[in-house]
Image (tube, coloured by chain):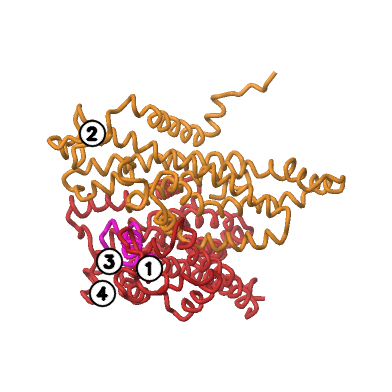
Amino acid sequence: MPPRIDVRRFVRRNPTIVIGAILLIVLLMIALLAPLISGDPQRLAPIDRLRPPSAQHWFGTDNLGRDVFARTVWGGRISLLVGFSVAAFATVAGIGIGLLCYLSGWIEAVVMRVMDGLMAIPSILLAIALVSLTQASVATVIIAITIPEIPRVTRLVRAVMLGVRERPFVEAATAGGSRPLKIMWRHILPATIPPLIVQATYSAASAILIEAGLSFLGAGTPPSIPTWGNMIAGSRVFLSSAPWAVFFPGVSLAVAVLAVNILGDGLRDRLDPRLSRRM
Amino acid sequence: MIGFIVRRLLATVPVMVVIGLFVFLLLHLAPGDPAAIIAGDNATPDSIVAIRHQLGLDQSILVQFVRWSGRVLQGDLGISIFSQTPVLTLIGQRIGPTVSLTLTTAVFSVSIAICVGVLAGWRAGGVLDRIVMAFAALGFSVPVFVVGYGLIYVFAIHLRWLPVQGYASLQQGIGPWFQHLILPSLALGLAYVALIARITRTAMLDVLSEDYIRTATAKGVAATPMLLHHALRNAAVPIVTVIGLGVALLIGGVVITETVFNIPGVGRLVVDAINQRDYPIVQGIILVFSGAYVLINLAVDISYLILDPRIRS
């Protein structure tokens, strides 16, 4: 019989995980169901430009008469897509590179120097420079944001590896004649999973922020796709006459990042008790 | 002690080489011909050949990198394609506002964050602590430009207390200079304050549970000297470390903040350069920003010598 999970106790003990997860699920549902809950985010209605929030336009309209609610709902798709993809790709790449370091000290020395160098370049600059080299698309944005995230994951994998390598059960496996690849797969890799889950949430939060920054600076997703960042960039000149066109995408952005961060903090407290009190 | 400084200094060399290599390769990593990228969309074959020769792109990659590094080490960051002006000159013209903004932000962020962090750590679990932690969670989550427009809307458009945008240099008087920097510094500093307040609280929590703090309290040392002399001094190393690492947040944020508040600094220069595909400027600014980050963290490492006598021996 599987162990019974007491839901109420879990909620009481891990309020942040629950709040973060619920918020994130709601945002995810809104993004997935965008075509059902909102109209066309690109529909122009010059007569209705800069209208305040009303029953017809819940979040008002922007300077081209586009519905801010529809654009906010659709903009969430890009943010969440970029957040999840970057977290996934950075984690996979970080594990791959980190484990490569386990196999050879020489590779490790070179890889860690490269990672130190990459980490010294401000992520947002690195990302805009990378995006500017190619045609702007959601895929290039994801790649450009993933690259500055990889060093963080790699360092984490390596730190965990260094800790586990000295543990008796790994030494026993080595003494027992297990091949390095098997030790890596059976003993090292599992130890990296809990901290990596926490790191993945932080990567997702940082990716959402950087994507918004890129879109805001006009160096990200093409302007034909509504994103929270380019909505704010497009409406900022009208801040005094139509604050709603900046306010709603801004608040959505903050709520999305906050949800991911809260979830991450909760998971860290739960998965990494050593750190729980620290930050 | 000299050995420590030399070791730290040497450790920055490979980092700088990797940054240099990356910045150099930036152009060559791009699909297509770097000369054609630089020449832009309506270039003639002749102008592409001219640019290729002008930049030495017709030589082997290794030769190009060695030559380029040599020039960079002599302070030659190349020439802007768009304005035909040396990149270093352009950066020099725009560095004033950027330095003003980052320094004001750093000074006020660090002072606020340490005060708040010390108090939160001292009364951990209390009301102030909870407010600080909630604020920190927000500070990590709200992007610079959202905070910026929020501040502009409330303090500049609605209350009319401060200028909406723009920059006044120090020559125009310290009053206007400071007025123009208040909102940008607040927007830029939010995440930095959150980061430092959190680490200060944690470091204080660790130190405050030490025996000598209990002894000092038992001896009747008052709260203020106890917190500042006994606790904060011993919590300094992790705090200073995070202040150094957090500079990355400031450097990244400055690019966006300058756009929000229309400040003619290096951040605006790089955004404009990227839109114009003026790669020598982009390369130069990434080098300068990354170099500043590495040097600041080197200074932080060396400051351990002052903060922690144990490292001196």
Q: What whole-number distance in Å separates the C-alpha atoms at marks 2 and 4?
A: 47 Å
Q: What whole-number distance in Å separates the C-alpha atoms at marks 2 and 1?
A: 38 Å
Callout 2: SS? loop
Q: Is residue A156 visible?
A: yes
Q: What whole-number distance in Å separates the C-alpha atoms at marks 4 and 3?
A: 14 Å
Q: Position of residue A125 (x, y in %)?
A: 42, 59
State whether residue A135 is above or below residue A47.
below
Judged from this view, the residue extending furthest toward the top is A1
In the rendered image of the structure, the colour used to display chain B is: red
* Amino acid type at mark 3: Pro
> What residue is disc 4 on?
B170
Q: Chain of mark 1?
A: B
Disc on the earlier residue, 4 or 1: 4
Label pair 4/1, CB-CB below 8 angstroms: no
> What residue is disc 1 on?
B281
Instruction: Tell me which corner region of the image, top left, top right, bottom left or bottom right, holds residue B79.
Output: bottom left
Q: Chain of mark 4?
A: B
| B206 left or right, relative to A67 | right
Disc on the earlier residue, 3 or 1: 3
Nearer to me, B11 or B74: B74
> What residue is disc 3 on?
B264
| B127 left or right, relative to A37 | right
Q: Chain of mark 2?
A: A
What range is drawn magenta here? B256-279
The residue shown at (27%, 51%) is B149
Callout 1: SS? helix
Q: What whole-number distance in Å separates the C-alpha atoms at marks 3 and 1?
A: 15 Å
